[in-house]
Image (cartoon, helix red, strand yellow):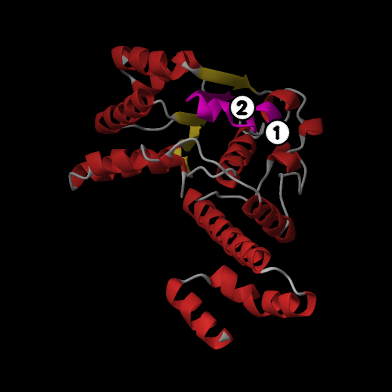
């Protein structure tokens, strides 16, 4: 009977339940465990396995460039960062409210570290998210114009409850890239989606970057309507070797398993993996 059960579980692709079947049935036979309790344990194992697999998929699709976390951020070395404010953001209320987060400061002050940490928290809590460098995103938008896939790309980006755009700085932008970027931000604003941007440019400098005052007026109006702004300053965190916030592989796996085992309730269908 066990072999038939395993074969059936394999057909149904219930790998979590199959992995613990023998152990749970042996335990039930020794202890005389009631059938409902055995079923509950088996279904719980399947649920945990699916959550862990879903989390792994979200993390892979987020394209996080570094294994950083907010817990490993060197707050003591960067006094301009309000730890309480950042950890409050980690509660993701800004995401549920559809607010943007704008991190402004010189290079090396920790903007990208906070951005990556917030995206990781979103993934751990059941949301789909994606990290882009500003240059890569603008290049992708420009390339989509050539094969007329811009609408499809914008729709794809607007299925993500959270995207991070890193290093929006002094870039050489073509007018078509500027237009496509505005379309993206306008569409996400209309849908009430959160966008996280790191930049070394203060908002008045965006006029020089995008070179079109009416468009920048409209862009900043949308961006700042629902927005949390963090201004960073102080020394570069790259000034000392090994100072970048990191996480060990073991800690990363442990965090994933903790998240997979707890109940996660995304706020809407787009938040689910």
What is the number of the mark on residue 106?
2
| Crowd rating for badge 2 (residues with CA inside 10 Å; few <14, some 14–19, many 20+) | some
**Viewed as shown, does residue 15 lie left or right of 73?**
left
Q: Quadrant of residue 56?
A: bottom right
Query: Where residue 236 is drawn, which disc sits there?
Result: 1
What residue do we see at 68% from left, 27% from top? Answer: 88
Mark closest to the chain's N terminus, 2 or 1: 2
Label 1 CA crowd tier, 10 Å (few <14, some 14–19, many 20+) = some
Which element type, helix, strand or loop, lies under badge 1? Answer: loop
Tell me which residue sits at (52%, 28%) in the image: 96
Q: What number of labels is visible? A: 2
**From this viewpoint, is residue 199 visible?**
no
Q: Residue at x 48, y 16 (%)?
A: 203
Query: Tags 2 and 1 in contact by the CB under 8 Å rule?
Result: yes
Residue 79 visible in the snapshot:
yes
- Dividing the picture into quadrants, the one containing residue 44 is bottom right
Q: Which mark is residue 63?
A: none
At which x and y percent is residue 254? Answer: 72, 57
Percent x, y of residue 133: 47, 41
Q: Nearer the viewer, residue 56 or 163?
A: 56
Camera-side residue of 105 and 230:
230
Relative height, residue 34 to residue 252 (above, below): below
Residue 223: quarter of image: top left
The magenta segment is 87-106
Rendered location of residue 152, percent (x, y): 25, 43
In the image shown, does 37 or 165 lie closer to the viewer? Answer: 37
Marks 2 and 1 sit apart, C-alpha to C-alpha, by 8 Å
Taking 211 as reference, is 141 above or below it?
below
Q: Is residue 265 left or right of residue 149?
A: right
Q: Residue 90 magenta-drawn?
A: yes
Badge 2 element: loop
């Amino acid at each position: 009977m066990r072999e038939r059960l395993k074969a059936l579980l394999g057909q149904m692709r219930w790998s979590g339940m199959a992995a613990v079947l023998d152990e749970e049935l042996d335990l039930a036979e020794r202890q005389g465990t009631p059938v409902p309790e055995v079923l509950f344990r088996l279904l719980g194992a399947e649920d945990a396995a699916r959550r862990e697999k879903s989390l792994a998929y979200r993390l892979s699709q987020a394209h996080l460039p570094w294994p950083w976390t907010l817990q490993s951020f060197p707050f003591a070395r960067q006094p301009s960062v309000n730890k309480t404010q950042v950890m409050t953001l980690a509660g993701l209320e800004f995401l549920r409210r559809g607010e943007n987060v704008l991190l402004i400061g010189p290079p090396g002050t920790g903007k990208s570290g906070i951005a990556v940490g917030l995206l990781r928290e979103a993934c751990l809590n059941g949301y789909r998210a994606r990290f882009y460098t500003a240059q890569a995103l603008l290049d992708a938008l420009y390339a989509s114009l050539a094969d007329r896939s811009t609408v499809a790309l914008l729709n794809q980006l607007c299925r993500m409850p959270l995207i991070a755009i890193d290093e929006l700085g002094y870039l050489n932008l073509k007018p078509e890239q500027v237009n496509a970027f505005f379309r993206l931000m306008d569409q996400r604003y209309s849908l009430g989606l959160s966008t996280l941007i790191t930049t070394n440019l203060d908002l008045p400098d965006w006029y020089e970057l995008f070179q079109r005052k009416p468009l920048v007026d409209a862009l900043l109006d949308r961006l700042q309507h629902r927005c949390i702004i963090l201004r960073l300053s102080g020394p570069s965190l790259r000034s000392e070797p090994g100072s970048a916030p990191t996480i060990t592989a073991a800690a990363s796996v442990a965090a994933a398993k903790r998240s997979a085992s707890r109940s996660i309730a995304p706020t809407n269908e787009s938040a689910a993996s």
